[in-house]
Image (cartoon, rainbow, N blue to C red):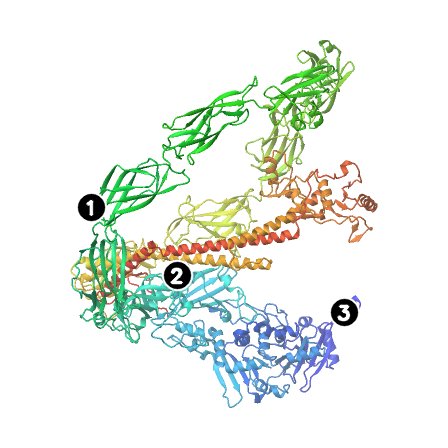
Amino acid sequence: MSKAGVQRLLSRRMIHVCDCRSNSVSQKKNLETSGLDYNDFLRCLRKIFSIHQHEILVLATTDRTVLDFDKFAELQDGETLYLLHNENQPLPVAVEEHIKFTPHFETLIQSGIHEYYASEGKKPLPYALAELIDNALSATAKNTGMRSIEIRMLFDESLGKPAVVVLDNGRGMTSKQLKNWAVYRLSKFTRAKSTLANQQEEYLRPDPVPRSLNSDISYFGVGGKQAVFYIGDSVRMISKPAGSPDVHELVLSKEEFERKEKNKEDVYGGIIKNREPGDSSHVVNSNDRSIHTVIAEERGKESFTAVVITGIPPEHLIYLKDSFQQWTRDLAHTYHYYIHGASGNDMNSSHTNLDNLPKIDIQVNMQEKPPKFPRAINLREIDNDMQTLYINAAAATFEFKATTPDGGRVEGLIRYHPFLYDRETYPKDPDTVPGPQKEEDDENEVEVRCQTRVKRQIFECFWNGRLIPYTTVSEFDWCSWTKRSKVPEECYGRFSGVLFANDKFQVSTNKLTFIDLEQKVKSADTILTRVLNGQEQRNVDRQFLDWLLYCHEKLDKQVKFLDFSGIITRNDVPTKKMQHPWAKFTAIELDGRTYERGKLVKSQKTQPIIHGTIIQFLLYGDHDKDVFATGGQVEISLEPKALYNRTKIMPISKIDRTATDEGIKKNIENDLNKLPELLQVDWPDGNPWPQNGVRPAGTPLGALTVKILNKKGDSMSRMPAVDQKTVIKLSVKLTLVQHVGDENDEEIVSLAAQHSAKWGFGFRKIEKLTNPGKYTLCLTTIINETSDTMFGGRKLPSYKLRFNITEGSAEAFVMDGVSSTLRVGVPFDIPLQLKDAYGNSAVPPSGLKPLLACSDLALSYETVDSCGKKLIIRGVKAKGKVLNYQQSQTYDLKVTLPGLKKDTQTTKISLLPGNPHTLHVKGEGKSFILENGNPARFDVEIHDEAGNITAHSKQTVRCKVDGLPPAAIDCSRTGAGQLVTKPIELKFTTGEPQMLRVVFEILNSKTVAKISVQLKVMPSKRVVLIKLWSSQGDENLELKDKERIEWLAGGSLEKLVYKLYDEAGRQVLLTDEIASKIKVNWTRHVNLKDVAQGKLPVVQVSKQVQDEQFCLVSYQEESVSVSFTIVPHPDDPASLKTTELQNPVKLGETVSENLNLELVDQYKNPTKTLTSACVNHMTVEAEGLDKFDVTFKWQESSRSIQVAGIRFQTGTPGIREMRFKYLSYMANVIIKVTAGDPSHLKLVSGPKEPLQVVNDHSIPTPFVVQLFDKWGNTSSDKRVVVELRSSLPALKVTTPVTSQPVNSQGKVFFTVDSVSGPKGSYQLDFRGSFNNKPIPGPSVDLTVLPDPNKPVKLLVEYDTTAKIRAGGTFPVFLVTVMSDEGIPMTTFKPAAVSMFLWEGEPSERHNATELKCSVPMKNDRRNCFHFRDKVIPTRTGKCTIQFSLHVGQTENLHSDQIPINVMANQPVRLGPTVQPPAPVVSCSTDVASRTLVNNLILRIMDSYENPAGQDLQGRVVVSIASDDSSKRTPLFDGKLNRYHMNMVQGEVHIRRLSIMENSPGENGSQYTLLFNPEVPAIPTPLAPFKLTFHFYVDAVNQQKMSGLLKKKEELSLSVERLKEVFDDYKELLKMLRDKYLAAVNKAVVIRDQLMQKHVEMPESPSIAAIDTLLMEKTNESEALLQGQNRVCSVQDSFSGQQDVLGKIGHLAHVQDDAAARVISWHIRGDMDCVVTRTLAAAERIHKDTGGRQQVMALESMFRPQVSRTLPHIRNGRMLFNSVGNPVHAREHLIFLQDKESCDIVFKNILRDTILIDDLHSGNNYRRSVVQTGIQCPTILTRQGDRISSMGKFGGLQNKAPSTNSFPVFGAPHPPQYYILQEQKELLRQYRGAVEKSEAAENDHNNHLENMNSPDTKKKEEDMVKMKKQLAEIERQLDSTPGRPLKRGAGEAHGIDKKRAK
């Protein structure tokens, strides 16, 4: 089709016209109207429909919109028109209007299934119905009367297939609106605003209303279609718009859509049937009979919409029928506030007025097949939906409001459901299935009432007044529990709440979830306020806490748990999750009584009835202080403890509150009398032992009989029966204990006796009392089964008998303490211990004389001493021949004491040698002979007085040989040894032997004498002398040792011979062995055959005369040598030589160095042959040399000629050659000539002039200044320093450096970072200095212009006359940013400007609050920033404001600081300056006891506690009030019930206020003092001050109460501190436990990873096992590396530093050896270069290495954008077939780190260098490339050749050497190496994890041990004692006559907290 044809098709407009003028069948024609105007169209119509020219006709759309010229032009292709007689003419028959809609029917039909099935588990069917109700509410929004919505469930199958019908009496839909409804996602915001459309099509956002109940909930154009196709598969939309006579009907059916698609019909179209109301002729299907009834009801209705859904799935039918109550309740919940109004369904309200309810009626009817009755319900009648339950169960409400910056508004409501004694009032969901009821178990009952906060989703969320069911909000920070909360945590579980959001918050298309509600409301930008009596108040968090405290104190009714003592875990609870935490308390308040620890209680409703003492109260939950709660349990110790010995836990409700202490104690006392009391002991054999009696050893004890008696005197053998199951038998245990020392007791006998009916408990005689000492006989009553001596905390009766046992007379003895090892001649003692018959120590008899005997030894003693029970024989000596110290000999020593029964004892002794006596040398008296050069050896022994070899400590023998150092040996262990001296080296002159004297002695011994011997030394045959000769012709020249020999330089010393001599002067014959030991130092190559013949190698003399040559001949074994030195002398002259100049020469400057000329020989040795006459024959030539100043001077000392006066006057800097000549000898000298002294500076480069710079801006182009000498040559003298300065001080020039020396090129670069100063003209001057002398330089003219973009000042404007009141809002601040030009700037964003506010003086800025500027309003000035609605601090006094502009990242511009005086706000109440304590008074005569307040100052305050009545006068009326009007009220002094006091300047000072003597009142009652202010100047009454006090009849109770309360406060504080310590212990224990578990889990995870890496690990490996496996992997990886030969040899000491990549040689690996060699050689100069990431790092390394290290900075490298292909490839096509496998050289590189950075580096170094196989292939490749007109890069070959980019190849410079003379890239590791490295890393991690788990376990156990330490236990005991004291105080407080105190006592209130209705 042509372009024009397509255009005509697109511009085509076909109109369908129905002729409805006839009362029968309408005629329909299709007209093409393209290019026709309205008149043309009318003419065409008249022609087609044969309409007379004068006949009146009306053309209207199906919406009954009459056409005119404009409306006709807006008609769209395919629209249908009516041809009518008049505008309101009824349609004679139904007219079909074809429509088109998108998208595909699958999207339309399946959308409902997809949207709702995603939440199918939550029974979404009611919310699908809610979508249809949303549409009905929107349709009826503008109804003036009742808005009726009806849901019909037509489930009577006899009338047709089931149908769901939703009817409303709303405005209805036109045909166009009905078509729009069919379009998916055509929301109210996107519908076309055509003039053909009804005005209802245009969307207008409704005005805000309470709870956002604006009915604007049909929103997206999605929900209705989703809903109907979720409920069924076919929908019939029937609607009649207001003012229209037609009904429009549209049917959408899944079946019809599928049929069209199957038949390939147009599935994007449908039919709207326009008809008369009540016309159901088109409904012909028998299954649609129920629809006839719906259509029949159309007549007479002004407007309506009916949605008829059929094809309902069976599961939906079942649910709708069976769960009728549930889903109607869900609907009532969803539309609760539309039905009942903004306040909800408050059934307790007395103000309910049916006329004030919303005019919305939602009726649900269900019709089923008979005999089932129809069901009908109005949603307003449902009273068990959750909102109704919440509203009517709430006792107080807290209302708040949240406003978001985008206009979002949320009205919030929190309701409080109090606890009432034994139940929570929080409503339960009626749909919740109750759990199974557990039967009560009285024996093991564990009643668990969870007192911790129930984690509920507090807030249900409503959007435009309707519920969004699947979105709930748990809490906000300000209404969530924290440890600082003043109320228990469970109070936060008694909330229900509602959030009413407007449509600024997004919801899902099916209105099931919010998208952004919680996120936006919790945003920091959201403003939260409390709404109280319609007024908004700030500080919502504080307001909420006050409200919650009021709710808890006034509304909750609970058991009060007092005196918290800790948290425990209860293992007796069967449910594990309920075992922890349980809070312990020592007391409770219940039903007006206090029950505390130690109090006696009695149970009720238990079997059996028990009595006991309260141990503690238990409450489930993590509590840490006194708390009101329900339930709970009490642990009691059954009484009497001695009988029951156990505890029991039962519910608090089981306590019998009617039992009295007297009755309980009486029952306990009766049980106590049955318990064992004492033991009765009898001695059947007579002779009873008295207490503390004395008996000799061996006396028997006993026999004994014992009886156990109770208090009644009855004998007993078992404990009284506690129950029928348990029998506890008794026994008597006998224990006989001997007391050893003060603390050590030894049990001798332990027996237990069973009961016998004949003799009770009996014991036989005890015969074992033979040891002297103190004894105790213990008889103890024990439990037979357990042997316990305690029962029920009470000790069972016992009996003790104490007595002493003494020793008998002496009958034997034993030797005690005799050493078994003795020494010859050394005295020793023999102690003897006397014993009785039982082995006890006894006193020796008088007159004993011992006898001693020992074989082979002579014995003697000095005396005998008696010491106590010992006999000591003193001074015993033994003498005789014994073995040496290593072989001890044993002797029998026998001692006899005549007169004893056992008079003889024998013991074994060993005798060792005695003390040293003489020194002996073996061989003494013989001749000692030794050969020279050997050490002398002597064997020595030390003898005692009997001649035995003896060994003692510090027994050192020394010998001294003449001429040698002493030799010593330690004989302490053996008594003998061998002395070895140093080798004896004597010099023999005659060859005769020599005699030496040797002296021996024992060091430090004065008792042993010295001895001496003679030693004869013989000469040896060792070589001791070498002699050398040189044969020069016929003459033999002997070379003396250390002789200097002159010889010709470069010559040789030949024919050297040698001879060897021994100590006797005899010549030693040469052998091959001796020759091998001859060494020379002038050559390595020695001919052994010549050396064996006495010949030595030739000596080559050095060619340089200064190189003297030291020659050494040595005999290595004997260290004998001879040496001589050869001194070379020069040959004849060969050339002229001159010295070189070391430094360059400046132009015009005379060389300071002197040149020397001399004649040298062929080896350049000075010959010193010149004479002074040679000066006249010297000449010199050079370019530019001033030869007239050159002089030649003779140097006599060196016999050389000195040249001076060298100076160059002309020419350019560079290299000059000087040529010297003498006769035929010549010499050349190269001299470098440099520029002359610096003369002036020139500007060689800089910015373009004239130069203009904006203030505070930089000069982008640098200034380049060059240094010159006077000849115009550039000078590079770095001593010249150039300075840049401004011509005037007002101009500030900022440069990196203000002065700097010139660089190596004689240049300096100055970069100007900024120029700042007043507008005007200036100069920049460049001046140099050289040796403190100025060097002139250039100047640059500069003009400074003001910067219009530079802020210089913040101008602040505000109403300075406004009063700043606390808590209010500041006046509007206008902040203008002024530029450098003095005009306002508007380029800054509002976020850049901040307002800082802090309390205090301007100079005290700290803790400042930052505030942002406000959103500009319509009429605001645009050149400034507005700060409005900023909250004033709530405290009066000084505060300061300062504004700040954020200019750059770190730069800020500040305004002047503005001091503000904050005044008090409006007065609201009367309050005290200091909160007084709660008074306790009595009606006694003492005025102090009757005083209510003393020195109380009350002031008028604002709502922020600031004094606000300084200018107010009035009075304060004081009265006493009571909650109970029937109680008598106390009277003030003077029998007054009111007290009046004047108020001055808003303040009243009450000196004293007291009640009268004998004042009326209820003893122990609580009253309230009301201080009511009366201020005429304030129209609104001020809130009174309230003070609660307690009234008692007598002063004693009053004083007691005051003292007890004070003591209670002190103890409570101490207990709280200890509790915090224990809480910290527990928290740390939990943390350590968690740490241990985390470490274990980590170890398990790593172990699993190791298993995946094929590393087998045992279940619980030890650290050693892991280390072993790690070592195996390490060895395996090292073995792999050992086979790798190629590594980079470059040392990299910079790698690892900050911003350093490393040296280039280490950045990559190359696998191929040939490629590695040639690439490394190609870039060998760069391999050592360090690559850094930043230029700063490169400069740092350059500086640290003194410029020696080459560096490259990554950030200064060029970064190629694309990688080039090889030259022979263009656009993916090969230009020619390449050979040699060309590739880019960099492709062989394997990067080791940071691949991207390394890629940039090597692209800059290698560029496009190519690697190819060989040179031939490379040349051919290059030729082919250049022939295509492409530049060819450098080519490298794997053979080591290089072809440069110019084509040059060959030569050494283009051939890589074969040896590794340069660093080469390393080879990569094998793949297995990296696998092993990964395994090693995992093993290291696993080892660390195992170590951490073990360490964490140790820490946990140590901390647990610390928690169980004595110190901790002591603290726990202290806390228990304190709690007992507190309990006692509580008991005393409870025992005080009168009614106990209620919660909240002592609190002062500024407002009257009444329950909100």
Along the viewing direction, whichever of 638 and 284 lies nearer the viewer: 638
Q: Is residue 628 above or below residue 1146?
A: below
Task: Using a 10 Å C-alpha cutoff, classify the residue at mark 1 as few (fewer than 14 neighbours), some (14 to 19) or many (20 or more).
Answer: some
Q: Tell me the quarter of the picture where residue 1209 sits.
A: top right
Q: Which mark is residue 8?
A: 3
Q: Which mark is residue 845?
A: 1
Q: Tell me the quarter of the picture where residue 246 sits.
A: bottom right
What type is the residue that disc 1 sits on? Pro
Residue 1465 in picture, x, y percent from top left: 37, 55
Residue 1765 in picture, x, y percent from top left: 75, 50
Q: Looking at the image, tell me whether mark 1 or mark 3 is earlier in sequence order.
A: 3
Q: Look at the numbered disc 2 and give the secondary structure of its residue.
A: helix
Q: CA distance from mark 1 to mark 3?
A: 155 Å
Which image quadrant: the N terminus?
Answer: bottom right
Q: Going by the picture, which residue comes out furthest to the front?
A: 856
Closer mark to the observer between disc 1 and disc 2: 1
Q: Look at the numbered disc 1 and give the secondary structure of its residue.
A: loop
Q: Look at the numbered disc 3 and give the secondary structure of its residue.
A: helix
Residue 331 in picture, x, y percent from top left: 49, 76
What type is the residue that disc 2 sits on? Gln
**Label 2 sits on residue:** 543
Q: Is residue 218 above or below residue 1855?
A: below
Along the viewing direction, whichever of 1228 and 739 lies nearer the viewer: 739
Q: Which mark is residue 613?
A: none
What type is the residue that disc 3 sits on? Arg
Residue shown at 25%/61% (left/top)? 735
One can see residue 1766 in this view:
yes
Q: Looking at the image, tell me whether mark 3 or mark 2 is earlier in sequence order.
A: 3
Q: Looking at the image, tell me whether mark 1 or mark 2 is earlier in sequence order.
A: 2
Q: Tell me the quarter of the picture where residue 1084 sits.
A: top right
Task: Using a 10 Å C-alpha cutoff, classify the residue at mark 2 as few (fewer than 14 neighbours), some (14 to 19) or many (20 or more).
Answer: some
